[in-house]
Amino acid sequence: MRMKELLENAVLSIELGVEDFESDDERRLLSAIRNLYAGVLLLCKQVLWNESPAGSDGALIYKELVPEKQADGAVLMKPKKAHRNTVDRRLIEERFKSLDLDLDWDRLTKLANIRNDAEHLFLKATPTVAREVLASAMPLIERLLVEHLEEEPLAVFKDEVWQKLLENKEIFDAQQARCRDTFKTVEWSGEVFTRALPFLRCPHCSSPLVRCVETDNMAFDNLWIECAECGEEIDREKLFEKAFGDVNDQEAYSIAKDGGMPSVTTCPICDREAWSRWDGRCVFCNEDQLICDLCETECDPEDYNTLDGLCSSCSWGMQKAMRDD
């Protein structure tokens, strides 16, 4: 692989993504999403290639590395010759952070989620979803090129491509802002709801243009929510339950690194993914205390057994005592 090959492939993928988006053939919208996402990852890999030690064959872009002794006695980590699989998104984030290279990881996670939803869940893409990908990708592309690769977007792309990306972001941001504004007067009963708002997505068409239709009482239990693109009414609990999962996915790297717990977990009472550790309760059924019937200590949802009403320690002790008898 040549030094600039990754950059050239990244630029080509992004340009193809924009061309796919501009096509009148809706079948090419999914291709647009794939190409934009692939282009961003290729830019990330070019950054890692540039950061790799001299003579290591761009080692940092590969998953599996092995030590190789050099002629001067130094040891260099180089990619396995038989397994040259390149890094995925999570490894890219890990290596960037270990090198103190900054990027908007929340935006990259969101971009990956959009791509996965369009690819695996919906098997189709709408113009708005494709527009969201272009809008989400643009700041990442600009930062990777300008800050990390010291390249000017206008110099590496065809004249019309960068302008299309800029125009699209303005249009999409305006559409999404209008939908987001409809939630401003909602009386949220927990912090987790506001954190989930950026992840709301129509379960019918995957569009992010989800809006709250006005009600007399703007409490969560009274909300009427619909998709501004396909017009379908949306179940509010299912909508937010999916968004809570995306919040957890956004935090996955830091949780794995720091040994923490997901911000949202399954409520043992209603069995929904709605127990918020920020709020200390289930935001759907409002259960806020899980007390062990034996030792009377308050339990985390992960430490509570609903079958016997005991904490994991007491539950294990009771089972052991029964076996010993």
Image (tube, rainbow, N blue to C red):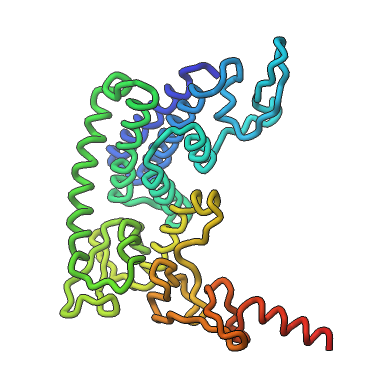
Q: Is the residue 192 above or below the residue 61 in the image?
A: below
* Residue found 43% across the figure and 29% down from its top: 43
Judge whether 107 appears above or below 270 on screen. Answer: above
Give the x, y percent position of residue 78.
65, 24
| Residue under the point 47% across and 74% down | 272
Q: Quadrant of residue 202?
A: bottom left
Residue 150 position by quadrant = top left
Q: Quadrant of the N terminus?
A: top right
Q: Residue at x 49, y 50 (%)?
A: 254
Q: Which one is nearer the viewer's eye here, 129 or 243?
A: 243
- The answer to whether residue 71 is left or right of residue 106 is right
> From the viewer's perspective, is 218 left or right of 323?
left
**Foreground residue among 225 and 286:** 286
In the rendering, at what x and y percent does residue 192 appear?
36, 65
Q: Is residue 198 above or below residue 233?
A: above
Give percent across and percent down for residue 246.
42, 58
**Residue 171 relative to residue 39: left or right:** left
Q: Foreground residue, 283 or 21?
A: 283
The residue that appears at 66% across and 21% down in the rendered structure is 76
| Residue 153 versus residue 255 in the image, above or below | above
Q: Nearer the viewer, residue 285 or 111?
A: 285
Q: Outermost residue toward the right? A: 325
Image x and y of residue 293, in percent? 58, 88
The quadrant of the picture occupied by the C terminus is bottom right
* Total numbered circles: 0
